[in-house]
């Protein structure tokens, strides 16, 4: 009787805590996707400055929520399928933002896909990988990973990056850094084939190449979420993606106009898009590296880089051909130099199966050089 009286006297848990206990998901990750649909429904981005700012905040929240729910689903699925789920989800967000801006009339929109893909590669290869190597090295000294899986990913990454971003500068069928329609179709198809082949190797044929070291402590990774939580996360992920696509379309013209009015290169838009969609994934890779699970960090990083090219290039190619939109893919001499330096450096720093803080420092310096030369061409 006393227990019943005590229970009745206890204050009811807050709505936030009750919802977290019932679903296993934080309240913000459930709220922002719904706010995104609400903002689209009332046309928030078309209102005054306050409405535009509010829509931008909701867009960022919806992106973070989408990647959070993708991480929940990915954790339930397990490695290496989990990183594949996360990479595909991030790419869907990235493509939606790129296409929304391509459909606007601002100058330089034809190069936005190129700038975003290149920015994503530089952020992943130098920013994320460099941060993970530095953080893991500072905490654990020397870290190890499965060399065969990383080598396979770098091989595919080098081929797709050069075919998509460098070769267009040296073809003769179309003027400028662009492919002719037949060439664009060819590169889109081979990029997709290379990515799907890598996925086959990663998930079926040679899955053991991408699994974390069995000697790692079992408590280095959190327990997988419940099945009900996973299904809620998956449904909310779909809602988040719809909200991101529609909000991005509504805000696209405003973002481009603000960048141009500030006198900054339009390439910064690509950096912003790539940084926005990769931010939560970067945090997940960083945390894994600090837990001495560098294999998981590299799976996240390199898998996202491959998905960025293997899925984004075919998607924007289809949009360009169907809607007859100009699409410039070739990067300039400065970009080619940084790309070659990045691919060469990461091949050396990840070429032994062991890493230290030195590799992380080198990659972060290259990333800083990329950011500086983007703002100050």
Image: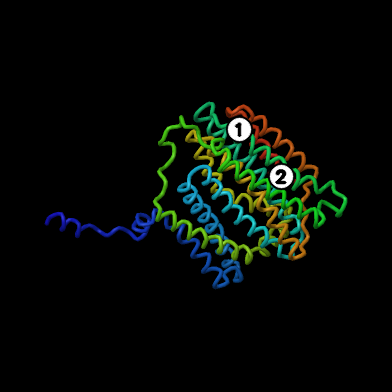
Q: Which residue is mark 2?
A: 160
Residue drawn at (39%, 51%), measured in percent from left and top? 226
Residue 246: assigned label: none
The one nearer the camera, 311 or 100, is 311
Residue drawn at (50%, 30%), measured in percent from left and top? 139
123 in relation to 49, above or below? above
Specify whether 92 is left or right of 216: right
206 in relation to 106, above or below? above
- How many numbered discs, if any? 2
Residue 148: assigned label: 1
The one nearer the camera, 68 or 155, is 155
134 in relation to 272, above or below? above
Label 2 crowding class (10 Å Cα cut-off): few <14, some 14-19, many 20+?
many
- Image position, residue 258 (x, y; %): 68, 60
Label 1 crowding class (10 Å Cα cut-off): few <14, some 14-19, many 20+?
some
- Secondary structure beneath label 1: helix
Residue drawn at (48%, 57%), measured in percent from left and top? 234
Specify whether 143 is left or right of 271: left
Q: Foreground mark, 1 or 2?
A: 1
- Image position, residue 160 (x, y; %): 71, 44
- Image position, residue 325 (x, y; %): 76, 62
């Amino acid at each position: 009787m006393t227990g019943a009286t005590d229970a009745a006297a206890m204050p009811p848990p807050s709505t936030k805590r009750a919802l977290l206990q019932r679903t296993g998901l934080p309240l913000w990750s459930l709220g922002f996707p719904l706010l995104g649909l609400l903002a689209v429904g009332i046309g928030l981005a078309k209102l005054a400055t306050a409405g535009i700012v509010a829509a931008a905040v909701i867009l960022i929240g919806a992106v973070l929520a989408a990647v959070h729910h993708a991480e929940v689903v990915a954790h339930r699925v397990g490695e290496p399928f989990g990183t594949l789920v996360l990479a595909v989800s991030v790419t869907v967000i990235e493509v939606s933002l790129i296409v929304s801006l391509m459909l606007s009339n601002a100058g330089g929109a034809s190069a936005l896909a190129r700038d975003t893909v290149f920015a994503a590669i530089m952020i992943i290869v130098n920013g994320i990988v460099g941060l993970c190597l530095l953080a893991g090295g500072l905490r654990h000294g020397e870290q190890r990973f499965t060399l065969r899986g990383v080598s396979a990913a770098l091989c595919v990454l080098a081929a797709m990056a050069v075919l998509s971003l460098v070769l267009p500068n040296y073809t003769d069928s179309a003027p400028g850094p662009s492919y002719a329609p037949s060439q664009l179709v060819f590169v889109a198809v081979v990029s997709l084939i290379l990515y799907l082949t890598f996925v086959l190797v990663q998930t079926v044929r040679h899955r053991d190449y991408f699994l974390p070291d069995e000697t790692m402590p079992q408590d280095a990774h959190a327990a997988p979420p419940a099945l009900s939580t996973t299904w809620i996360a998956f449904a909310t992920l779909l809602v988040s993606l719809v909200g991101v696509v529609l909000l991005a379309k509504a805000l696209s013209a405003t973002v481009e106009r603000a960048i141009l009015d500030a006198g900054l290169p339009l390439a910064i838009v690509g950096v912003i898009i790539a940084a926005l969609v990769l931010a939560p994934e970067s945090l997940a890779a960083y945390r894994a590296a600090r837990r001495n699970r560098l294999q998981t960090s590299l799976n996240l990083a390199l898998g996202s880089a491959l998905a960025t090219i293997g899925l984004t290039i075919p998607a924007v190619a289809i949009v360009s051909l169907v809607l007859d939109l100009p699409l410039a893919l070739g990067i300039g001499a400065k970009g080619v130099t940084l790309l070659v330096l990045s691919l060469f450096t990461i091949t050396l720093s990840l070429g032994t199966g062991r890493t230290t803080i030195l590799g992380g420092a080198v990659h972060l310096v290259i990333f800083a050089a990329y950011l500086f030369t983007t703002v100050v061409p």
